[in-house]
Image (tube, grey):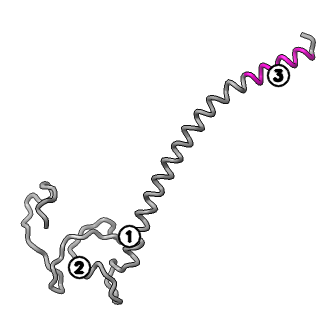
């Protein structure tokens, strides 16, 4: 593990390189599966590439799906911001409409009074 990480997460740990069953170094990776989202595990570089054989969660299609999820998450946040802005504008327009309604009712009262002869 890299010693530049946070000291609290490395406190009490011995920095030993872990190795995969295939013999390659196995650094800490993060799982993107539905069963273990965000779970840390040790995995060698073979987890990153789809070489035509089943390699578990690390198929390229899953990596592409993860990237698409990230893009959609950003898009959702932008839409939430747009929605908040539109709600604010709606509140402002609602406040502006109230004085207009008052004027309309005043004109209606005046017209009725004229027709009634009051």
Instruction: Give the Cα distance between marks 1 and 2.
Output: 21 Å
The C terminus, quarter of image: top right
Above or below residue 112? Residue 73 is below
Which callout, 2 or 3, points at the residue further toward the start of the chain? 2
Number of residues whose C-alpha sits closer than 10 Å to that of mark 2, classed few (under 14), some (14–19) or many (20 or more) = few
Residue 103: percent from left, percent from top: 74, 22
Mark 3 Cα within 10 Å, few/some/many (few <14, many 20+)? few
- Place of residue 37 in the rendered image (x, y in percent of width and height, measured from the top left): 33, 66
Q: Earlier in the sequence, mark 3 or mark 1?
A: 1
Q: Quadrant of residue 16?
A: bottom left
Left/right of residue 85 with respect to residue 71 in the rendered view: right
Residue pushed farthest bottom? 52
Please tell me whether mark 1 sits on a helix, a strand or a loop: loop
Q: What residue sits right under mark 3 in the picture? A: 108
What label sits on residue 20 in the rendered view?
none
Residue 101 position in % (x across, y down): 72, 26
Mark 3 → mark 1, Cα distance in angstroms: 63 Å
Give the residue displayed 48% in from the left and 56% down from the top. 76
> Which of the 4 quarters of the picture holds residue 92?
top right
Residue 99 left/right relative to 92 = right
> How many numbered marks appear?
3
Q: Against 29, is 25 above or below? A: below
As for residue 17 lying within the magenta part, the answer is: no
Q: Which residue is mark 2?
A: 45
Magenta region: which residues? 103-115
Q: Which residue is mark 1?
A: 34
**Residue at point 52% right, 47% down?**
82
**CB within 8 Å, label 2 to label 3:** no
Confirm whether the magenta stretch covers residue 112.
yes
Q: Give the SS element for disc 2.
A: helix
Q: Main secondary structure of the magenta part?
A: helix
Which residue is painted at 87% across and 15% down in the image? 113
């Amino acid at each position: 593990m890299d010693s530049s990480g946070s000291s609290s997460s490395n406190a009490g740990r011995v920095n030993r390189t872990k190795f995969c069953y295939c013999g390659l170094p196995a650094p800490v990776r993060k799982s993107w599966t539905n069963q273990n989202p965000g779970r840390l595990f040790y995995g060698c570089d073979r987890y990153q590439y789809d070489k035509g054989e089943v390699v578990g969660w690390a198929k390229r299609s899953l990596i592409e799906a993860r990237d698409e999820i990230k893009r959609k998450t950003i898009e959702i946040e932008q839409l939430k911001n747009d929605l908040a802005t539109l709600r604010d504008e709606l509140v402002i327009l609602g406040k502006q409409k109230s004085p207009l309604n008052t004027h309309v009712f005043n004109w209606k009262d005046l017209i009725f009074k004229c027709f009634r002869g009051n």
